[in-house]
């Protein structure tokens, strides 16, 4: 009689703005692991979670929690404290990647281009005066701009500003999702995402996925409503540019101290230079998400990869 299959708890749902996306990701992960023969419990985190994990410890946790509850490092820190193996980046790397301005500074320091930007807490407008702040932005960062919450994902609160008169509204939208906003120069080019996986032999870049939203903007709706975006896996870029993008993504992954899996979002300009936008410690894993598309483009079976990542988590924490 062989060994019992790994017992995995997949965490999905939570209370963030991305709850529905998380539930879809978690269901896909759970189904893939079940098909690969693992024992899986799909659980929505609640006030009883930690007590349940301490009383009946699983072999490994597979977090599929998007938004603050799963990606800011807090839950990961608690799992580290409890000594329960889990898939994905440790709390330190998650903290760094979750804060987009901090991630940009670290990745730029490692030699990867990133668009010029300014980080503005909501209080800056109250202390310095809104007119003065907007005038300073206009002088230093000409449109087009991208305004986004400094933390968060799924393009929530993100606005492309082509007319400086629309900047105040964009800032208000960003502040709906947090107290700090990032105002970033918009680089025109091909939007791509490079997934990274590491099942034990070091991080490997997957084929870049090109994103072509039919509306022209890769919004929350374009990400999760089938038919609103065309995806090309692999991306329609030259081998040379693809290699440069893969290298940039690997540099970002390592510089931020990420683990097991990540997705690095880049934009390739007309000269073929990849520009770092952000890194995601828990990429979307829904039926329209980019990492599964990249895994399939590379010829990987999702169940095998997700199971191998669970094995890697146990080895890393043993």
Image (tube, rainbow, N blue to C red):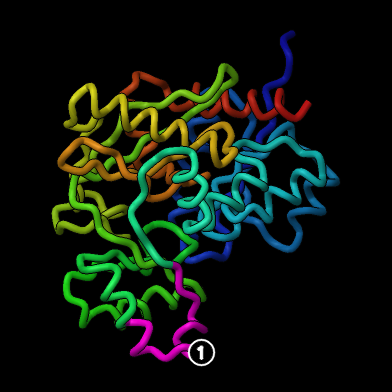
Task: Give x and y (percent) for residue 119.
Answer: 45, 68
- Please say if 227 is above or below 221: above
Q: Is residue 277 left or right of residue 94?
A: left
Residue that appears at 23% across and 23% down: 240
Q: Nearer the viewer, residue 223 or 277?
A: 277
Q: Residues within 10 Å of mark 1 (few under 14, many from 20)?
A: few
Q: Quadrant of the N terminus?
A: top right
What residue do we see at 36% from left, 77% from top?
171
User: Which residue sits furthest top?
Assistant: 1
Q: Position of residue 161 (x, y in %)?
A: 23, 70
Identify the secondary structure beneath mark 1: helix
Name the residue located 49 percent from the left edge and 28 percent from the top edge.
197
| Residue 205 screen position, x and y as percent | 41, 26
**Residue 163 magenta-drawn?**
no
Q: Is residue 198 left or right of residue 248?
A: right
Q: Name the dominant secondary structure of the magenta segment.
A: helix
Relative vertical location of residue 294 with respect to residue 168 in this rendering, above or below: above
Question: Above or below — where is 105 with respect to 127?
Answer: above
User: Which quarter of the figure has residue 184?
Assistant: bottom left
Q: Which residue is mark 1?
A: 127
**Looking at this view, is 283 or 138 the one in front?**
138
Split into 4 quadrants, where in the image is the C terminus? top right
Identify the image quadrant of residue 206: top left
Q: Is residue 132 magenta?
A: yes
91 w.r.t. 120: above or below: above
Does residue 221 appear in this view? no
Residue at point 36%, 44% (across, down): 113
Q: Which residues are magenta?
A: 119-134
């Amino acid at each position: 009689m062989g060994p019992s299959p790994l017992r995995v708890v997949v965490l999905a749902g939570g209370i963030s703005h991305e709850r529905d996306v998380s539930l879809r990701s978690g269901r896909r992960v759970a189904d893939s692991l079940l098909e690969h023969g693992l024992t899986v419990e799909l659980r929505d985190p609640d006030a009883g979670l930690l007590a349940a994990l301490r009383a009946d410890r699983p072999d490994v946790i597979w977090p599929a929690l998007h938004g603050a509850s799963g990606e800011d490092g807090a839950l990961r820190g608690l799992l580290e404290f409890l000594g329960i193996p889990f898939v994905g980046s440790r709390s330190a790397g998650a903290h760094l990647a979750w804060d987009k301005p901090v991630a940009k500074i670290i990745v730029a320091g490692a030699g990867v281009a990133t668009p010029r930007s300014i980080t503005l807490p909501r209080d800056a407008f109250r202390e310095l005066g809104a007119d003065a702040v907007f005038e300073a932005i206009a002088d230093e960062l000409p449109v087009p701009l991208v305004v986004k919450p400094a933390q968060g994902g799924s393009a929530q609160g993100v606005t492309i500003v082509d007319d400086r008169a629309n900047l105040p509204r964009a800032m208000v939208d960003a502040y709906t999702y947090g107290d700090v906003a990032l105002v970033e120069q918009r680089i025109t080019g091909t939007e791509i995402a490079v997934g990274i996986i590491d099942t034990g032999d070091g991080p490997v870049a997957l084929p870049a996925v090109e994103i072509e939203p039919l509306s022209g903007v890769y919004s929350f709706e374009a990400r999760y409503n089938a038919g609103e975006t065309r995806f090309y896996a692999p991306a329609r870029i030259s081998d040379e540019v693809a290699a440069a993008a893969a290298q940039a993504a690997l540099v970002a992954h390592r510089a931020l101290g990420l683990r097991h899996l990540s997705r690095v979002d880049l934009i390739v300009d007309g000269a073929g230079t990849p520009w770092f936008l952000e890194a995601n410690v828990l990429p979307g894993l829904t039926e329209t998400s980019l990492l599964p598309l990249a895994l399939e483009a590379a010829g990987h079976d999702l169940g095998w990869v997700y199971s191998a990542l669970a094995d890697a988590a146990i080895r890393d924490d043993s």
